[in-house]
Amino acid sequence: MDTTFHGRVLLVEDEEFTRSLLVDGLQRLGIEVCGAASISEALDVMAEFDPHVVISDLNLGPGPSGAALLSRIADEYPWIGLIALTAHSSPELAISDGRTLPESVVYVVKSTLQSVSDLVPLTLAAISNLQVVSMPIANNQRVLTAVQGDVLRLIAEGLSNAGIADARGISVRAAESQVVRIFAALGIESDPHVNARVKAVRMWQQGQIIVR
């Protein structure tokens, strides 16, 4: 695959340091880049900047996720390539508002990037509507079901077993059982010196969990 790209990229990332790092790195590669910190800011510059590719983090802070932005762009600007950039190996864990990603999105896990230049062939793949259908499971990754992934997301939001039960419309005992099964699937053993919930959330944040 050709590794040169000199088009326009709109990069949407709410963390200022990460956004600046990626914008500067892509510009050094000869790519024209416009950075945006939010969905509203990205939509404001879409028409004027007219990007060939939009790269968006999926976690953009409070409010709609990056999936909402990518879905809107897919509907209104179907000729624009789309890249979802996230820390999570599975979209089910990365998207908190229940949305799904457009089929044409190239899904990129941040930890797999060795340098900013790795984004260049991915922009070409996005323009060609090449889709990353599935990702291989790395040695350090654990697999959860969709239900387990949803429960883990609730744990990450700070909910207790009772809170999880209310959110999912199940009994507290059923919630407790689901949490125990998640810990077992993640290989987290009972240890009075370790907070299993914190450890599970850290594994999620570090991209060590995939949902299938």
Image (cartoon, grey):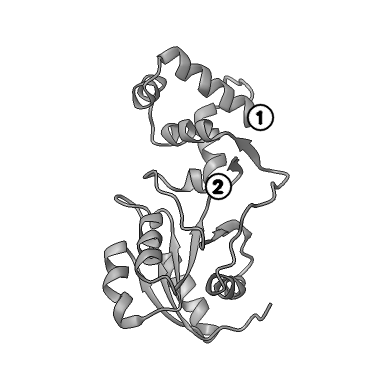
- Looking at the rendering, which quadrant does residue 97 occupy? top left
Circle 2 — which element?
loop
Position of the N terminus, as image quadrant, is: bottom right
Residue shown at the point (50%, 65%) measured from the top left: 83
Q: Residue furthest top?
A: 173
The answer to whether residue 10 shows anywhere in this view is: yes
Q: Position of residue 129 (x, y in %)?
A: 55, 69
Q: Quick one: label 2 or label 1, which is nearer the N terminus?
A: 2
Residue 43, relative to residue 52: is it above or below? Answer: above
Residue shown at the point (36%, 56%) measured from the top left: 68
Q: Taking 10 as reference, is 121 left or right?
A: right
Is disc 2 surrounded by few (<14), some (14 to 19) or many (20+) residues within 10 Å?
Answer: many
Q: Position of residue 2 (x, y in %)?
A: 66, 81
Give the residue pinned by disc 2.
Answer: 90
Front-lying residue, 82 or 25: 82
Position of the C terminus, as image quadrant, is: top right
**Kind of residue at disc 2:** Ser
Front-lying residue, 89 or 201: 89
The answer to whether residue 14 shows anywhere in this view is: no
**Kind of residue at disc 1:** Gly
Residue 181, relative to residue 149: is it above or below? Answer: above
Residue shown at the point (32%, 75%) measured from the top left: 46
Circle 1 — which element?
loop
Give the residue pinned by disc 1.
Answer: 187
